[in-house]
């Protein structure tokens, strides 16, 4: 079962001292001519333009533009004025850990799939992840890399539910590893994310059928989560 959480909803950011998650639909083909990418920095534009598929470029541009919009609303800085850096990696102490604001004022995490963009913001380290529920064969193959207790949970599920059970565990694990700053550099079998992990609280997010999502927050106690379904109004 997921960690209990209080979900609240509001159209605007309410402050920096709470956990907030934006759940946004991925842009459609019609969005391509309306996306404002002027706030992206040169590195972001280079990464966006490196994608071969037009849809991937649009998704990347929208996700990073949305992140800047959210952080601008919370910090008071103009979206284009925000600067990012990397925290030290917990595995090797090199500067390729989780992305952070420079100077650091709050913590954030970004994830996107073909259907959704997630942005999480908190006063402590945070990770978010969203993925579509995979095909059964893919879920079965990837489940072999999980913690033994997680593999047992997937195997114990009814065949028609195994892919969804796997997807729930996978996004919880990815959110946790992103919050740690290790990403997939940490052994996927090292942690059991079915419930809470020491020092962290993991929560499943309600994002609709066919998709799984989770948020992991470094917190000594359960925390409420404010969900937003639209970007802050400028």
Image: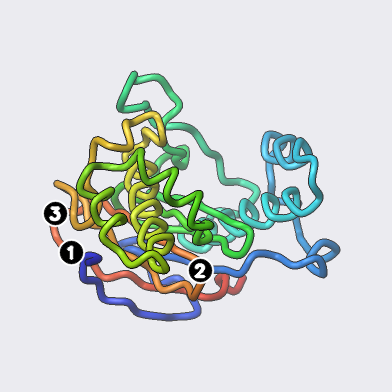
Disc 3 is placed on an element classified as: loop
- The relative height of residue 104 versus residue 137 in the rendered view (above or below) is above
Farthest residue in the front direction?
159
Real-space CA distance between mark 3 and mark 2, rounded to the nearest whole angstrom: 25 Å
Q: Earlier in the sequence, mark 3 or mark 2?
A: 2
Residue that badge 2 annotates:
23
Splitting the image into 4 quarters, where does residue 5 fall?
Answer: bottom left
Which quarter of the figure has residue 28? Answer: bottom right
Place of residue 117 in the rendered image (x, y in percent of width and height, measured from the top left): 56, 61
> Is tag 2's residue or tag 1's residue first in the polypeptide sequence?
2
Q: Residues within 10 Å of mark 1 (few under 14, many from 20)?
A: some
Asked if 96 appears above or below 101 in the picture, the reply is: above
Real-space Cα distance between discs 2 and 1?
21 Å
Image quadrant holding the N terminus, namely bottom left
Q: Residue at x 38, y 56 (%)?
A: 166
Instruction: Examine the rendering and report whether any part of residue 9 can be seen.
Output: yes
Q: Position of residue 62 (x, y in %)?
A: 68, 57
Residue under label 3, please give it. 220
Seen from the viewer's position, the closer of residues 49 and 147 is: 147
Looking at the rendered image, the quarter that the C terminus falls into is bottom right
In the rendered structure, are the residues bearing label 3 and label 2 in contact, judged by CB atoms less than 8 Å apart?
no
| CB under 8 Å between discs 3 and 1 | no
Task: Locate residue 220 relative to residue 190 in the image: left or right.
Answer: left
Numbered mark located on residue 222 in the image: 1
State the image quarter where residue 26 is shown: bottom right
The secondary structure type at the circle numbered 2 is strand
Residue 177 percent across, percent down from the top left: 35, 41
What residue appears at the point 52 percent right and 63 percent down from the top-left corner? Answer: 73
């Amino acid at each position: 079962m997921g960690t209990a959480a209080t979900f609240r909803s509001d159209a605007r950011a309410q402050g920096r001292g709470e956990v907030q998650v934006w759940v946004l639909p991925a842009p459609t083909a019609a969005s391509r001519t309306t996306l404002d990418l002027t706030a992206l920095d040169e590195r972001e534009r280079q990464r966006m333009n490196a994608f071969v598929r037009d849809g991937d470029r649009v998704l990347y541009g929208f996700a990073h533009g949305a992140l800047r919009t959210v952080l601008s609303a919370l910090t008071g800085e103009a979206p284009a004025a925000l600067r990012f850096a990397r925290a030290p990696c917990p595995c090797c102490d090199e500067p390729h850990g989780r992305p952070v604001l420079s100077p650091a004022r709050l913590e954030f995490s970004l994830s996107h799939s073909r259907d959704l963009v997630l942005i999480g913001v908190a006063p402590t380290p945070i990770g978010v992840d969203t993925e579509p529920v995979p095909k059964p064969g893919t879920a079965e193959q990837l489940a072999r890399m999980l913690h033994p207790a997680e593999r047992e949970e997937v195997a114990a599920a009814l065949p028609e539910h195994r892919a969804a059970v796997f997807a729930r565990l996978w996004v919880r694990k990815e959110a946790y590893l992103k919050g740690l700053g290790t990403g997939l550099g940490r052994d996927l079998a090292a942690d059991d994310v079915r419930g809470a992990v020491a020092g962290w609280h993991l929560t499943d997010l309600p994002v609709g059928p066919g998709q799984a999502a989770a948020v992991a927050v470094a917190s000594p106690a359960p925390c409420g989560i404010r969900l937003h379904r639209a970007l802050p109004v400028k």
